[in-house]
């Protein structure tokens, strides 16, 4: 059980293009914030529509009054804090100086559609992650399954 009096990091879903103004408002209110940005374009958030805020749980209702805040990520019982390891990993990746790209999370057996590449428009299901940049997609064809490796950036949820 989380101690509600200890500040923890929360992911906050914000209105599109409101990350910067929401972070500034939260800072004005005395909250610690983190808005990771793309290395190549410092104006573009690494996670568009999301910011991170370190606060105590009892202040969560007050955060909803901040312009731009839609919700604090959690479940039916309320906000869920990020672990120290999760926020440290995000900060480490942000500071590493390497080119970082975010991608949707695809689960095995999830149906996807190829939005780019030579197989554009074909739907299939994700079989497994083959490495950090590619997925194997199963496409039913002639009562057989054909597996191809495709660039992760070509996939979108179906």
Image (spheres, rainbow, N blue to C red):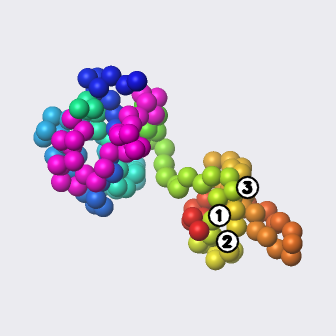
Q: Residue at x 26, y 23 (%)?
A: 5
Which image quarter is the N terminus in? Answer: top left
Residue 43 on image: x %, y %? 30, 55
Relative to residue 45, is residue 89 drawn left or right?
Answer: right
Residue 38 on image: x %, y %? 39, 51
Q: Which residue is drawn at 86% across and 69% down?
A: 144
- Residue 5, visible in the rendered structure: yes
Spot the residue most to the left.
28
- Do residues under tags 2 and 1 come within 8 Å of each other at their CB atoms? yes
Residue labelled with disc 3: 127
Residue labelled with disc 2: 123
Counting residues from the start of the chain, the first of labels 1 and 3 encountered is: 1
The image quarter containing residue 95 is: top left
The image quarter containing residue 90 is: top left
Residue 128 on image: x %, y %? 71, 51
Label 3 neighbour load within 10 Å: few <14, some 14-19, many 20+: some
Gap between marks 1 and 3 measured at Cα:
10 Å
Q: Which contiguous range is marked in magenta?
A: 59-86
- Residue 36, visible in the rendered structure: no
């Amino acid at each position: 059980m989380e101690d509600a009096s200890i500040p923890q990091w929360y992911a906050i879903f914000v209105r599109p293009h409101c990350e910067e103004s929401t972070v500034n408002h939260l800072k004005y209110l005395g909250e610690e914030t983190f808005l990771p940005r793309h290395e190549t374009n410092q104006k573009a958030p690494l996670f568009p529509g999301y910011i991170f805020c370190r606060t105590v749980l009892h202040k969560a209702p007050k955060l909803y009054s901040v312009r731009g805040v839609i919700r604090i990520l959690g479940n039916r019982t309320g906000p869920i804090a990020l672990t120290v390891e999760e926020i440290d990993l995000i900060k480490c990746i942000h500071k590493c100086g390497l080119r970082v790209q975010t991608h949707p999370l695809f689960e095995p057996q999830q149906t996807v559609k190829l939005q780019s590449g030579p197989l554009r428009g074909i739907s299939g299901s994700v079989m497994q992650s083959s490495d950090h940049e590619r997925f194997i997609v199963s496409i039913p064809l002639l009562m057989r399954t054909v597996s191809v490796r495709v660039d992760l950036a070509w996939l979108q949820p179906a």
